[in-house]
Image (tube, coloured by chain):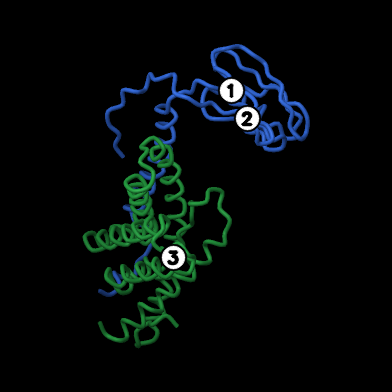
Chain colours: A green, B blue
Amino acid sequence: MESQDKYRVALLSSYALALHGFETLIPSPIPWLRLGLSNIVTLVTLYQYGMKPALMVTLIRVVLGSLFLGTFLGPAFFLSLGGGLAGAFSMGIVITLFPGLFSPLGLSLIGALFHNTAQLFIAYLFFIQRIDAIILVAPVLIAAGTLTGAINGIAARYLVIEIQKADRESPSPMTGT
Amino acid sequence: MRSKGTNHNTTFGDKVLLLLLVFLSVYSFIFIKEVMPEGSDIRIEAAGKLLYTLPIHINKTVEVNGPLGTTVVEIRDSRVRIKESPCNNKICVHEGWVRSGAIICLPNRVIVSITGKANKKHEDIDGITG
């Protein structure tokens, strides 16, 4: 990996981390229900630099975020890790296989759906083991994921448009400044 | 991998996906309501304490006291409702008769919940997709 790529990944990870931390300050009606704002950064990374950096940004965000919040290696960490990676993978695969089929809005919805599905699976396999509880929670997560996914997707779209506009105006590659 | 073009308008795929997800959300809520077993016991809590656990098939009217005054809970025909409440907004009263779930009156701190699994008519589910 070139040093400039490392720099980009570090910068984007710090953005994601900031959003991740900021998000925990927002009160939520249900404790584990989150906006998933850091997914905006994952999505922008995916659009601008591809799947591998997007996965790295997600990984760094989840690990460092859990260290800062004190949840490292706890249940919340594994839920966050599985959800984050599933979301980034699903969006990366869809954008690679079907470029142009979805805008950032659609990709964000896919990411949110896979994020939540992965979390439900992990919760069932390792923590809860009660299928009735999981099924009961699933509709809430699907509905919330659709709403937050749409909001994040729209935010990511504007961000991608602005970054690419800035890219065209200055010949040097956009590094996030 | 550089950016995939500059057109980021909402695509047809987006719209189909969004519609599907909204449909899935709504349908899954309906599905859950259908599938979840109806309970057998009614638990009445006031101010954080469990006061009564009553079988759902009896007909009975119970009065419990909360911080604001007396809440009247009525059980009839395997359903339960809050008949009268001293709270302002009367959300609990407007919920009417319920067979499953719970009625919660936050101002008067009264929780009426239906628990247990006596009614097992939906037990024969053998697979769930989606």
Q: Label 1 sits on what residue type? A: Thr
Q: Which residue is mark 3?
A: A66
Q: Nearer the viewer, residue A68 or B35?
A: A68
- Where A155 falls versus A115 (above or below)? below
Q: CA distance from mark 1 to mark 3?
A: 42 Å
* Residue that appears at 42% across and 37% down: A136
Please state, as top left, top right, bottom left or bottom right, where the N terminus of chain A lies in the image. Answer: bottom left
User: Which chain letter goes with mark 2?
Assistant: B
Q: CA distance from mark 3 to mark 2?
A: 38 Å
Q: Check if mark 2 and mark 1 are on a common chain.
A: yes
Marks 2 & 1, CB-CB < 8 Å contact: yes
Disc 2 marks which residue? B50
- Residue A137, how many percent across, how many down? 43, 41
The chain letter under disc 3 is A
Mark number displayed over residue A137: none
Question: Hey, which quadrant is residue A25 in on the image?
Answer: bottom right
Most foreground residue, B12 or B112: B112
Q: Position of residue A65 (x, y in %)?
A: 44, 67
Marks 2 and 1, how far apart at CA: 8 Å
* Secondary structure found at label 2: strand
Name the residue that disc number 1 marks: B53
Q: Nearer the viewer, mark 3 or mark 2?
A: 2
Going by the numbered disc 3, the residue's amino acid type is Ser
Q: Position of residue B81 (x, y in %)?
A: 62, 22
Q: Which image quadrant for residue B5?
A: bottom left
Q: Are marks 1 and 3 in contact (CB under 8 Å)?
A: no
**Same chain check for tags 1 and 3:** no
Q: Nearer the viewer, mark 1 or mark 3?
A: 1
Identify the residue at horizontal 42%, vertical 28% (top origin).
B36
Residue A38 located left or right of residue A94: right
